[in-house]
Amino acid sequence: MSPESITADQVWTWLEGVPDPEIPVISIVDLGVVRDVVCANESVTVTITPTYSGCPAMAVIAEDIKLALEKRGVVSVELVTKIAPPWTTDWLSEKGKARLEDYGIAPPRQTGVPERCPNCHATTVTKVSQFGSTPCKAQWRCDDCLEPFDYFKCL
C-alpha cells in the first residue's frame, strides 16, 4: 500500500490493535486516548490525550503508535499531545468498558461507585483505598466473594 492511499479509517482500525500498556486488554482507541487522525501528504498525524497529565504510559503509547503505523508502511508519523479538553472516562467506548470488567477491573460510573464486583457480579462492595495499582484506579473489595478489585476512577 502506498503512503498516499492510506485513509484515516484505516489508521483508526490499525490503532484499535494497539493495547494500553497498563491495561493490555483495552486498545488506546477504546480507552479514548486517540482523539483524531489526519492523513495528508504521505504523512499521518495522530492526536492523543493522556488519561492523566503525568501519565507515565504516554511515552510507550506514542512509541507503539509509531511502530504500528510504520509496520504498515506509513513513513511519516506525527504525534500531537492535546491536554485540553482533559481526558474523561466518558471517552471510554462501551466495548472498552466491557473489556475492563472481563479483565477484573470495574468500569467507571458517574456515581463514583462500582456497579458490581467484576469477579462474581455481586452488588455489595466496599472501598479499600482511593489509590489502586495505577493513578487512574482505586482499590475496592467485594463483600460477597471478598476478592479485591480495581475500579477505574470516573473523571
Image (cartoon, grey):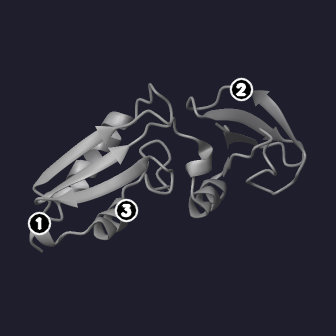
Residue position for label 3: 17
Residue 62: percent from the left, percent from the top?
29, 42
Could you tell me which secondary element the residue under label 1 belongs to? Answer: helix
User: Neighbour class for label 1 at 10 Å: few (<14), some, many (≥20)?
Assistant: some
Q: Which of marks 1 and 3 is nearer the N terminus?
A: 1
Q: Is residue 10 left or right of residue 114?
A: left
Q: Which of 154 and 146 is in front in this view?
A: 154
Quadrant containing the N terminus in the rendered view: bottom left
Q: In this view, does 123 lie to the left or right of 151?
A: right
Q: Residue at x 11, y 68 (%)?
A: 4
Q: In this view, does 59 lie to the left or right of 35?
A: left
Which of the numbered marks, if any, corresponds to residue 32? none
Q: Distance between the residues labelled 2 and 1?
A: 46 Å
Q: In this view, does 36 lie above or below 140?
A: below
Residue position for label 1: 3
User: Neighbour class for label 3 at 10 Å: few (<14), some, many (≥20)?
Assistant: some
Q: Which residue is drawn at 64% across and 61% down?
A: 98
Q: Residue at x 74, y 46 (%)?
A: 109
Quadrant containing the C terminus in the rendered view: top right
Residue position for label 2: 130
Which amino acid type is shown beneath numbered disc 1?
A: Pro
Could you tell me which secondary element the residue under label 3 belongs to? Answer: loop
Q: How far apart are marks 1 and 3 (CA)?
A: 19 Å
Could you tell me which secondary element the residue under label 2 belongs to? Answer: loop
Residue 55: percent from the left, percent from the top?
44, 30
Which amino acid type is shown beneath numbered disc 2?
A: Gln
Q: In this view, does 25 lie above or below 150?
A: below
